[in-house]
Amino acid sequence: MKAAITGGTGFIGKQVVCQLEAMGYEVTLIGRSDIKGETSLLRQKLNNASLVINLAGAPIIDKWTDYHKKNIYHSRIHTTRNLVYAMDPKSTRLFISASAIGIYSEEGVQTESKFTYAYDYLALVCNDWESEAMRLSNNIRTVIFRFGVVLGKGGALQKMLPLFKYGLGGIIGNGEQAYSWVHIKDVVEAISFVISNPECKGVYNITSPNPVSNKTFTEALAGKLKRKAILKVPAFVLKMKYGEGANVLLTGQTVIPERLLAQGFSFQFPEIDGALENIINQNSDLQKLS
């Protein structure tokens, strides 16, 4: 069995590659130069890959200059478009592509069947991203995962730890915004689940079934690390640092993984306390903080 993956050296991608190899796949990494190069060369890399996974994309949390906004867009839409164009339906049986819960409105509870889309820049990116991924869905089984905040050793949590280490971790804005999260192990297992179940196709939310508020998350993390979270990060500070990108931190979506649950997927870490405890216990550098 052969698989090809973009974003395979990133926080999520590394874990997915390990899982694929454990499942018996021979994995080919698709890099930026492969995507930007000749289509014929990309087709060679995808040759005989029955599974293609697309996790590529520039970081969202950064100062949203015009240049970075274009990079957010092009690193997702153009990458996905080129990848889909190079895939051969005769050999590729399953295409899994990333998206984000930023496609949803911050108002109300969002599931795959009952939802309201947002109309901001990130929602536009997600919508175009998914449209590119679905181009061959009539010929190739296609799964789109709308990711929440993925927690593990790396990613968003890794960036927070230095602040909490020195007692500077705090609630963002008013802390009431939703925080739809998921443990990295559940991400990997969900990907394995759809690979192993041919009936799985279409859009899936990949978040814990129990989203929390930013305030609840912050207090839970501070408690596990035995640190205080008495400081608040004012909205204007984030806007000065990230510009328009601050809205990603100051707003949030309440998202439920309805389809995964309905199809029998069981989350190992459905609650935030258990998820954080596992991450800290499994990583010695985090244990030093607790």
Image: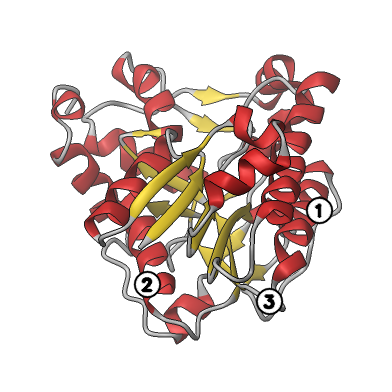
Identify the mark nearer the N-term, 1 or 3: 1
Name the residue: 36% across, 66% down.
Answer: 192
For the residue pair 22 and 151, the one nearer the viewer reads as 22
Q: What label does residue 18 carry, if any?
A: none
Q: Which residue type does callout 1 highlight?
A: Asp
For the residue pair 111 and 163, the one nearer the viewer reads as 111
Label 2 to label 1, Cα distance in Å? 26 Å
Image quadrant for the C terminus?
top left
- 222 left or right of 263 in image: left
Name the residue: 37% across, 48% down.
Answer: 27
- 236 left or right of 160 in image: right
Q: What residue sits right under mark 3 in the picture?
A: 139
Q: What secondary structure is marked by label 1? A: helix
Q: Which residue type does callout 2 highlight?
A: Phe
Q: What residue sits right under mark 2 in the picture?
A: 193
Q: Nearer the viewer, mark 1 or mark 3?
A: 3
Please provide percent x and percent y for residue 49: 48, 58
Identify the mark nearer the N-term, 2 or 3: 3
Label 2 to label 3, Cα distance in Å? 21 Å
Place residue 172 in its image quadrant: top right
Q: Nearer the viewer, mark 2 or mark 3?
A: 3
Place residue 268 in its image quadrant: bottom left
Please provide percent x and percent y for residue 228: 31, 26
Q: What secondary structure is marked by label 3? A: loop
- Mark yes or no: residue 270 visible: yes
> Do the residues under discs 2 and 3 have CB atoms within 8 angstroms?
no
